[in-house]
Every structure is written in structure tokens, then in C-alpha cells.
Image (spheres, coloured by chain):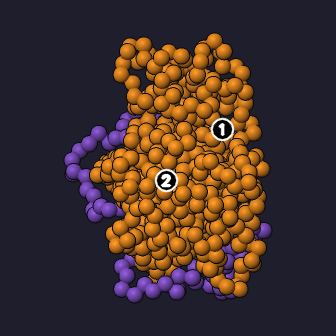
Amino acid sequence: MSDLITKKTLKYLTDLARIEIKTEKEKKLLKDLVKIIDYFEELKKADIKDIEPMAGGTVKNNVFRIDEEDDGLPFQETKKDKLIEQFFEEEDSFLKIPAVFDEKNKRN
Amino acid sequence: MKKIKEIKLVNMNDFSFKNLTIKEFNQGLIKGEFSAFEATKSFFDFIKKKDKKIKAFLNLCEENALEQASRVDVALGEKKNLGLLAGVPIAVKDNILVEGELCTAGSKILENYKAVYDATVVKKLKEAGAVIIGKTNMDEFAMGSSTENSAFYSTKNPYDLKRAPGGSSGGSAAAVASGMAIAALGSDTGGSIRQPASFCDIVGLKPSYGSVSRYGLIALASSLDQIGPMAKTVEDAEILFNIIKGEDKFDSTSVNFFEGRELSFNDLKGITIGLPEEYFKPEMPGEVINKGQSIAKEQLKGAGLELEVEEAVENVIETLKSLKIKFKKISLPHTKYALACYYIILPAEASTNLARFDGIRYSRNYAKKDTGLHKNNQPQPASKFSKSALEDIYFKQRGGGFGDEVKQRIILGTFVLSAGYYDAYYKKAQKVRRLIKQDFEKAFSTEKVDMILSPVSPTLPFKIGERTGDPLAMYMSDIFTIPVNLAGLPAISIPVKNQKSAVSGQLPVGFQLIGKPFQEREILSVGKFYENLFK
């Protein structure tokens, strides 16, 4: 059994991932995570000496666009209103969110 | 296809469009047997009746679809040269953006999100005259193999309503299989097009990594994701693929590629298909599991290759031999590591891709629009982690908006990427991924096989609820499809025809052809020759 993930680690990870987990869901989640991470141990048997990590699937190297002004496709002016419409709260075409720097409630 | 106009298309038991292929639909349209508008309308009538049972769609695009159909009719009236897809009703998986339509990716967190632009594939389909009729159900953010992880409801397999249609593109597969769409788009990260295609007796193509633009696809794991066609025949899948493929400046991984050749009947005798021994050993997936550890034996039920599937695939091999195609045993020795490798890389990429769903952008739930901000500015109750109002939104929205499977994978991804574990898990998985890719490269170069044949899924369609309790049991469903995504290869799932196995009864089985990079055309060719034998 993997002891890598404990209740404490789980709390640390959910804080990093910004996810609230209901107490009644914790037990099953922890059980599944332990099971999956145990399964990862399988990779220990693979001989990976001198093997370069494969970072992605693409056959391309760096892809650059030409550094010039463009029409901002697809987010032209016509799409702007639709985007704003999606937003939770707005005022005069500005998007409203709670204060990012919140002195009163900052993390201990 | 006779006199559809006169029957007025009301008799749903005799829904005249149900079994049509793209070409047959096109013939009817060109000959004036029906208009695109009439066809679209009768599809919606049929869906509204049929989908009560199947639950393949999350949202219908009726208004935009009928408008598009009318445009096709106008163009037809003006004798404009229309392509094969003109007026063809196509369903689109709900993680692909269609402008002005809801796009939920099967998740509560995007329940109210409307796409503001068309995905490149959708744009191309629309330009070809296709009619997007609806958005199909899927496992939340494409995480799953049965469509049971949808936040809204499970889709049923049209061949047995008690069984799963596969997943994650289960809605698209079920829609095509039950005649509610002529073809569909799905996305495939570890088998999500091919496995549901196999479960629902249709064709599904996972293109090479880079063949099709993912612009406008809600990303799951960006080094693995591909969009591909799901259709009734290989020919239909090819027609769709030819429209959606190609380089797109909005997806830097997409390329214009050398397409390979269309094989002639005479070419077939020069073709050698590899049979990976690791895929045909029934005990193979079992070996992968830690022996005697936390995994009980019954949880591995169905992990091995089922006899019915093995027989069906052997039947295909015999059939292809009759076309003078040669077969050769090959070895892909790192196959046994593919699942573990995939379930490290996928959550890692998913956890970063899904960071954008923060309850600030896209959409916010669990609060009325006009009061939400005010509410979140109230002082927070004292707790160990006193959160700012903004953080509070993140935690609550993500906690409430994501389903259990998604949360589990985000946390897993956060774990394998976190300091101290990155080398042990993520980096190691990346190295093993290269070994898996090299296995395929060796098969194609040293062993000189042109393509590889295997089952799609080790089992027949399983019952709804049968595998939801245990994550590893569900993962096993993709054991033969995952290595293909890790290696970036093209692969197609084709229904096994003329199946004689009495045990499997009516349940569909598919076989998989895996091609060399960007050689979609070769596997499509062989697929068409196979299919034509049963016409």
C-alpha cells in the first residue's frame, strides 16, 4: 500500500488545485488515489536508462507567427459583446470580479 | 429512399433517413427527393422521439440547423456546385465549440457556457454545407470510457439499453448508431472515439497527432487529444476526415502532411499487417497489475481479452487473408507500461488545462447573476485556511462544478507534477512514453509491417454501472487504444462483420487498424476493402 498520499497530503493537493472536497467524499477519493498511485509503481520495472523524455506528440519544433498586426481573429469587435455577455457580472463593458488583493481575508 | 416527400416523414418506425450514408443522402438531395430543410426537420422529429430512450444529445441546435439547411436549399436552387456534405445532419461532441450554442463538455461547471466562436473543424464542416444538429453527451471533460461520468445523464447503447455506449464520445456513437445523425465528430485522447465506435457498431477514426486542428476543442491532455470522425461506414469517415484535416494557424501542432496513397486491390498483396503478441495474450493486462496488492481479482474482471472479441478479430484476420494481405507476428514489448504511463501524463496535462475553469471566466453557477459578487464579499467564516473572496470563488466553483472523476484526476495531476514527485512520476512516464513510441517505430521499420491490427477494447459493451466503482477496471477498457495516442499514430475502429459467435449474440465488436504516422489513407483503404466484402 502506498503511504504517499495521506489525508494531510490530500489537503495540501486540494489547496494547490483550488478544489473544495466534501468531507463525506474524502474517504473514497483517498482510497482511489492510493490504488492508482500504487499502480504507477509498475513503471519502476521499465528500463529507462539513457532515454530522453518525450515531451509531446508533435512533429514540429518551434512554431512562430509572423510578427505583424492582424485583425485579432477570431475575437473581432463583433465577438466582444458575446464574450462580455458570458461573464458573471459586468459594468459598462468592464468585467467585475472580487478584489484580488483582499487584506482583510488574506491567507494566514 | 423512394418518395420521401409523400410519406411526409411522420412514421418514425419507418424513418427514411435512418440508414443513409453520406453519399446516399447526397444522391437523394441532388435528385430532389427531399430538401435539406425537410430532411433536417424530420431528423429533429425523429431525435425528439428516439432520444428519450438513448439520451445521446445534451442540446439540440434546431434554429441554427434549420437556417443552415435553408441556405443549402437556396444554393441548390441556384444550381451551385455543392459538396458531398451539403445538408448532411452531423452531431458534434459537446467539447467542441459551435458558435452560439451551449458547450458544456458534460460538466456542471460549464452548464451555462455558450460558445462565442466555431471550432476550426466546425467552421470547415459548415463551409462544406453540413448541418450541425446537436451537441452530444460525453464523460465530463472526456474523462471516462462509458459516458457514465457525464454530469447530466448516462447515454444508453442502442444495441442494448442496459449497456454503456462506451466513451467518452458515447453520445456521438449512439447518435450515429441509432440513425439520429448521419455522422458525428468525437475526440480521442486514449480511445474515446474508437472504443465507443466499437461498442456501437460504427466506424471511428483517430487521426495522427497533428492531422486535425484542435482549435475550439476543450482540451483534456494536449499532447494526446485529436478530433476525428465517427460514421456508419469507412467511406463516410474518410469524407469527413478529408474536410476537417489540415494545418490551421490557430493550432500550432497541426500540419499539412503527405497523405500516403490510396491502395488499389493489387496493392493489397504487398501489404503486411503486424499482430502484436502482447495484445492477444488474454492474461496481458492482468500482468500489469501489482500482484496481490490492493486490487482484488474480481475488480480485474474483464481486463483480459474476452473470447468473443478474440474470435471476432480472428475472423477479421481470416477475411483479410482472403484479400491476399499478409500477416506477421510482432512484439510491442512496452505495451504493459502504457496504462500507468498514460494515467500519469493525462492527469498532469488535464490538471493544468482545467485550471482555466476557475468560476471567474466562462461561467459561474450556484449563485444568481446579480447577487453573486455581493454574496462573495461577505466576511468568511473562520477556518484554518481563511480564503480571500476570490479564492473562495475558486474553491467553491471548482469543488461544486467538477464531478468526482474530474476532481480525482486534477488532484492526481497536481500530485505527479508537485515538487519531489515530478521526477519519480511525470518525467519517468515521459521516458516510458518514448519507449512505447519506439516499439511502434521498430515494428514499422525493422519488422517492415505497413499497419497493425488489434482488438479495440478487450470486452464487449459492458453493463451500465458495472465498472463505475473502481477506477482501474474502467481504465482497462482502453488498454489497446491508449498506446496509439501515446505514440501519436492514426488508428481506425471498424465493426466486425459477419460475426458468427453465438455467445456474443447481437453485441457489436470492433477491430482496430493502426497506421504509420500520417498514413490515414492506407488504413482507410484497407478498411474500405474489408467493408466492401459485405456490401
Q: In which quarter of the image is residue B314?
A: bottom right
Q: Which amino acid, by three-letter code, is at mark 1?
A: Ser
Which residue is under mark 1?
Answer: B178
Q: Which amino acid, by three-letter code, is at mark 2?
A: Ser
Residue B311: image x %, image y %? Answer: 64, 61
Q: Name which residue lies at 50% across and 48% down.
A: B530
Which residue is more in the foreground, B69 or B261?
B261
Q: Name which residue lies at 62% across and 31% down.
A: B18
Which residue is more in the foreground, B375 or B112?
B112
Which residue is more in the foreground, B340 or B151?
B340
Chain letter matching colour orange: B
Q: Name which residue lies at 59% across and 51% down.
A: B496
In the picture shown, does residue B242 fall above or below B451?
above
Q: Name which residue lies at 39% across and 65% down.
A: B449
Q: Which chain carries label 2?
A: B
Q: Which quadrant holds the C terminus of chain B?
A: top right
Query: Marks 2 and 1: same chain?
Result: yes
Numbered disc 2: secondary structure:
loop
Which residue is more in the foreground, B84 or B73?
B84
Density class for disc 2 (Cα within 10 Å; few <14, some 14-19, many ≥20) is few
Q: In which quarter of the image is residue B184?
A: top right
Question: What is the drawing colour of chain A?
Answer: purple
Q: Which quadrant holds the N terminus of chain B?
A: top right
Residue A72: image x %, image y %? Answer: 32, 42
Rounded to the nearest whole Å, what is the CA distance between mark 2 and mark 1?
Answer: 31 Å
Residue B39: image x %, image y %? Answer: 57, 23
Density class for disc 1 (Cα within 10 Å; few <14, some 14-19, many ≥20) is many
Which residue is under mark 2?
Answer: B322
Q: In which quarter of the image is residue B380?
A: bottom right
Left or right placement of residue B465 versus residue A70 in this view: right
Residue B35: image x %, image y %? Answer: 52, 18
